[in-house]
Image: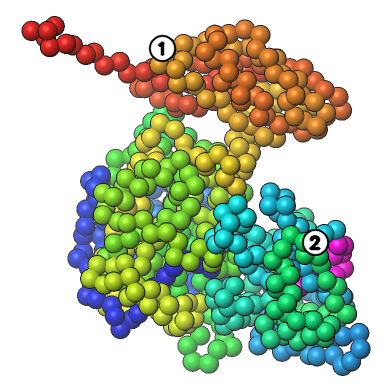
Amino acid sequence: MKKQMAISFAAMGVAACLTVGVFAAPKTKVDAAKIREYVKKLAGDEFEGRGTGQKGGDAAAEWIAKQFESFGLKPAGDKGTFFQEVPMVGVKTRAESTFALAPANGAEIPLKYADEIVTNNEAQDEKAEIDAPIVFVGFGITAPEYQWDDYKGVDLKGRVALLFVNEPESTDEKLFKGKALTYYGRWTYKFEETARHGAVATLIIHRTDLASYGWEVVRNSWGAERSYLRRDGTPKLEAASWIQLDVAKKLVGMAGLNLDELYKKAQTREFKPVELPVHLKAHLASDLRPFVSRNVVAKLEGSDAKLKEEAVLYTAHYDHFGIDPSLKGDQIYNGAVDNATGSGILLELARVWAKSPAPKRSILFAAVTAEEQGLLGSEYFGKHPSIPASKISLDLNYDALAPLGEPEEVEVSGAERTTFYPEVEAIAKEFKLAIKPDAQPGAGHYYRSDHFSLSRVGIPAFSISEGMKFKGHDTAWGEAQAKDYVDHNYHKVSDEFHENWNFRGLVKMTRFGFELGMKAANQPRLVEWHKGDEFEAARKASIVKALDRSVLFAGIPELKLVDFTPLIYPPLARQIRVSGDVKVRITVNESGAVSKAAVISGHPLLHQAVLDVVRQWKFATISESKDVEIVCTFALIDRSSGLGFGETFVEGPQHLITLGNVPMIQKIESKAAAR
């Protein structure tokens, strides 16, 4: 599910030149012929559309692993291999399944599967019988930060939720980020949230303008077998469904209501759920197929003794929709643009990095599975990363880059939310690439590709893709190619490799990503989210997870740290070389908040830095308030020491150490002294 992608096969130019260098001058040039080779191979019929849990998908994973190995990279998967096993279950709705709308008075209206409704049993049950009342819940959003609750206390247990995809219309940046779609508008959130509220089934109303894709995309994505991560106790729906807009209009019409009017009412905080005098009756039969798919993960070890424990991550999904035997004629979803192109770039990055001098931090490469099934491979990797998430500085993702020629714009939506954005701007300028704002902010592209899975566990992440302006063409031409691709090839068997594709742009995007990775891998501090960003809390949680809490609070088992802000070396103290211990006493109240904090001893220039941080810490609730003393050591280190500037370590029980580099002092001589 994506982004801006563009392709018009008739408009393709000649092939790009074979090799182009990068600004940082790696030992090996980025090779257009190599990228072409990778894309053509992955999009070929040999891999049968790279279906998740299908023979072709497994074969593609094996081939990618062999490429990583041939480059000389180290395996970073399970048990010393290149593979991370991802346990999954394939769920396919059987033909004998039936669906109907049953009004309190009147005849039932049967629904035609695929044409009017598509569904899957997320609960992974072979049989489900549903006869439950339908409740319209607007957009199905619970967002306390926006004072928004579409449920207003309604009990959805055993009921069916009816709702719109997307989110309330807004031009206010302080309400659902204005015109930009947040995660609250994504279909994945709708199913997650309604399941948390106890719904047995959910009906998402499809509107092309709200979804940003037509019904055919929904039908192709949901009509065949769909994969899920094996159950882990998270609430799931027995029928996670989409319905056609006309069906939704009939449904609310049975209650004497108008869908357009309900849509208007759902735009306000005052909206209240509407129980309809209509039941969903469904007999849902499913074929279940447990299987194991695989992420393919490789590593280039960093050169710095300490920083090599951290990493910059590159990702791209290699899966597509495989083979659909029910189709007449061509049955293979080759997925050439989506996403043999991103996988080709990932492989070329791996090849170039493997033959270049290693940066300070390590470099990870992850070709992930099951993106088309709901970002499942990247979700699993985010929950089970090769190294702790807190030590992954940045994820750079590639997904569906059309081989249209040389771009003059780049899209890096989400980069502006991180501390790395100034570097992104500077490198884009070097490449003569204008940074293109998201052309369709209302489509929520940030939440529709694998970088989002990494963001959810706190890792700063964004995708790199071309904008709409290409050399020799105006913006309107690029927009026309994007529309052509979405209308005629996106998630269709026609997404195939073409010999006349121009790979110059993919070379440029590879070089650009290499430069970004080099910068992030060598800079003193890890990339972070800007303060207040929606993923900042997840980043803090990942840091807490990485800290050895059993050591930090040894002897105080009732204290469980759940939200940790690391110490920051005060710039002035570092500049005048102040170091040493600060002892602080904190009081943790019953709610887990730090209600008091006082410095017992230490240099005054270090006091406030400690107090500002410890007051932000959060603990799990406890039976009674607790006083704790903590020692915070500030230590200056030489830049060549191999230790990471700005890092916080657990030295022992109730003892943290924060490192700062010894400031560089320039000797300035006057002209008179020089004479």
> Looking at the image, is 619 positioned above or below residue 66?
above
Task: Name the image quarter holding residue 88.
Answer: bottom right
Instruction: Identify the residue position indicated by label 1 in the image.
Output: 576
Q: Which residue in the rendered view is the most extreme toward the right?
A: 105
Could you tell me the amino acid type at mark 2? Tyr
Residue at 59% in and 35% down: 543
What element does badge 1 sit on? loop
Q: Residues within 10 Å of mark 1 (few under 14, many from 20)?
A: few
Could you tell me the amino acid type at mark 1? Ile
Among numbered discs 1 and 2, the one appearing first in the sequence: 2
159 within the magenta span: yes
The span picked out in magenta is 154-162
- Measured in 3D between alpha carbons, the distance from the residue under mark 1 to the one under mark 2, in whole angstroms, is 56 Å
Instruction: Identify the residue position indicated by label 2 in the image.
Output: 151
> Looking at the image, is 380 positioned above or below residue 285?
above
What element does badge 2 sit on? loop
Q: Which residue in the rendered view is the most extreme toward the left?
A: 675
